[in-house]
Image (cartoon, grey):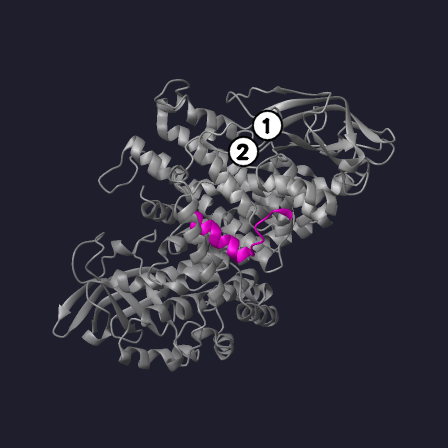
Amino acid sequence: MALVYTEEQEMVRDSAKGFLAEKASVSVFRKMRDAGDTLGWSRALWVEMAEMGWAGILVEEQYGGLDFGMTGAALILEEMGKNLTTSPFLSSAVMATQVLRGASEAQKQAWLPKMVSGEAVIALALDEGVKHDPASSQLQAEKLGNGYRLNGSKAYIIDGFDADGYLVLARTDGEAGDQDGLSLFLVDAKAKGISTSSTKLLDSRNYAGAKFDNVEVSGGDLIGEAGKGLDALEPALNAGRIGLAAEMLGASAQCFETSMEYLKDRSQFGQKIGSFQGLQHRSAHLYSELELVRSAVIKAGQDFEASAEHSGMIASLAKAKSGEVAILAANEGVQLLGGIGMTDEHDMGLYMKRIRAAQELLGDYAFHAGRFAKWRGF
Amino acid sequence: MADLEQFQQETRDWLEANCPKTMRKPMRTESDACWGGRNFEFKSDDQRNWLKLMGEKGWTAPEWPKEYGGGGLSREQSKILKKEMARISARPPLQSFGIWMLGPALLKFGSEEQKKEYLPPIVRGEIRWCQGYSEPGAGSDLASLQTRCEDKGDHYLVNGQKVWTSYADKADWIFCLVRTNREARKHLGISFVLFDMASKGVSTKPITLISGKSPFCETFFDDVKVPKENLVGTLDRGWDIAKYLLTHEREMIGGSGGSAFASRGLGEVAVSALGADDDGQLSDTALRAKIATAELDGWAFLLTMERAKDEAKAGHGVGARSSMLKYYGTELNKRRFELMMASKGMSALEWEGEASNEGELPRAWLRTKGNSIEGGTSEVQLNIISKRILGLPDPKVV
């Protein structure tokens, strides 16, 4: 398949560009941050995005979705990355809906239409420690009649504060670190025994910690097979990683564009600083790296569309490379802008903060490089 | 579609019937390559026949027009031919600067007579070409070249020196950049001429590199007479042709750096040399991390080359992007060979003897150092990206 966007995909990008510039630009994000908003995104705006079909972009048509494919979703995330737009798009529309593909008909009927309309948001409660590592989950799911009882805690849940439901990764068998023995439950946030608290990170978005204290769930709340939770999760993780790679590509591209404008505008020593070869070569190198990231992101989207389960290697490639280059783009952005780049007034710092968080989420460079190496047989 | 399927079947049958068995395994060393030309010594009858048969069909230059000896194939058909050749591991019948470089330039800039005269012998591998570009005083600043070409009425007279001329000592003809106007600005006084290396006054001297023997030569021109019809394109406007060819060359060099990653993985090399733990992971964890980084970049680069081709086909390529591919691909290749050397430890240092195939790895490693110099240095490529793609202002000349 040619590594270029289709006309339909380009149209989605264009409409995202227009919509976000008008309604969710970086100044909107800044206002929200300054207001100290704990939700971290706007419900009204999310409903508008849902009306454009974004909340259901990966959902099958019979549940009201567009089933448009990952490349299109990645293009929306890229534009969101450029604008630092916040929304539950990545957590709920890209990742949670992907898990629900493996859910029962009853679960789908109960949640998908509400998610597609923008009414309900589901967050994935996966990690418990400071590094992404689902297999190390210890939250216990103890068999209780036909159902289970959950005890334990989760941390750094993306959009986990004030979510309507959680996909909880729990251990039904085995020990922390085992690939097998984990199960996925879809739990209503109102279930008795769940308490959440907002965690404020440097990117001013919505994260939460959650405690599960004797939370009772039924057998019908299980997704897929007991003990095979990581398999059920794999497509969603791949989607999330590709999505984050795309978002970081957008954020990096914006850092780069801002830097280039500055180099052409700012004068020192009687000439534009962009004429200095020392800065030109750094810029040209970063341009080259960004080209590599775009290729990896496009390929990852196409691989995901071909097989969500088997797109892991290229998803890891995209996440690792995009994160690495995004850090470079943000660091170069601040350096090339000099003092102004260090001020809170300039947007560059906002990008740097988001990039730092995004490259850590769902596995950092070392995590994905290690996975890639394993796939490559070393 | 049906036509393509039929073409594929016919191609497969033809290759099956005509490709000699000994030509159906990958080339082991440089000496297995067939370069053709007046003085080429074929290694075997099979090698000679394979070139002859492919040349007659025009399949050494599959996409060139039939009227100039080419295969006249469409891009899709040419892809199929490539695939079918790869299927039986058929060797390329011919390595040729004529096909890679001069041919495309003649097709674009040459006169009808020149195309008719020069292209068919290139396709058949009868004339071997070399490229006369760099000079001792004109490296990165190629346009400052000084080899003189004077109009003597019924002929040109060429005097000067070229350097880094690949295979000048083996080539039959040269395509050469010469100065035809010393008054004009440097880019506007250059012409593109062709002449026979057997002409009186041409001499060559091989250059030994840090890696050992090399195809590079110094080439000297001492009152070389060149027929006037051997000028390609317009007098004094040879720089346009030179730029076109340089773009071509960059893509070739950059491409070869990246495609190495498609073959045997670096990690695999390291595991077989240094061993793995119970999980199959390279025991040396620091080296593993470095190799993983190089492999990630290698894959992303390969995808970028693929995308560049796809975009060019869709009609929105960026011409100057060849500079990015050249820059990144060659730097990547250098990194790759550093890691190959690390993966093989002391054995990577063996310079002579059968075990090391006469120091094949360390020589190849040293040779990669030239990748980011030849065809325009990395720094020149970064200058081009800055100017043409990023639109950054020219440095103030002091």
Where B278 sits versus B163, above or below? below
Give me the residue at 50% from left, 22% from top: B211
The span picked out in magenta is B68-85
Q: Secondary structure at mark 2?
A: loop
Residues at circles 1 and 2 in contact by the CB criterion of under 8 Å:
yes
Q: Secondary structure at mark 1?
A: loop
Side (left or right) of B372 relative to B356 = right
Q: Which secondary structure dominates the residues rendered in magenta?
A: helix
Could you say where residue B42 lies in the image, as x and y percent from the top left? 49, 30
Where B32 sits versus A162, above or below? above
- Residue A135 or residue B171, whichever sits in front: B171
Could you say where residue A279 lies in the image, as x and y percent from the top left? 65, 41
**Which mark identifies residue A95?**
none
Q: Which residue is mark 1?
A: B167
Q: Amino acid at mark 1?
A: Tyr
Side (left or right) of B311 relative to B150 = left
Is B83 covered by the magenta stretch?
yes
| Quadrant of residue B326 within the rendered picture | top right
Give me the residue at 19% from left, 74% from top: A219
- Residue A308 or residue B91, whichever sits in front: B91
Is A254 covered by the magenta stretch?
no
- The residue lying furthest to the left in this view is A145
Q: Amino acid at mark 2?
A: Trp
Q: What is the CA distance from the residue labelled 1 to the residue labelled 2?
A: 10 Å
Question: Which mark sits nearer the N-terminus, 1 or 2?
Answer: 2
| Quadrant of residue B398 within the rendered picture | top right
Q: Which residue is mark 2?
A: B35
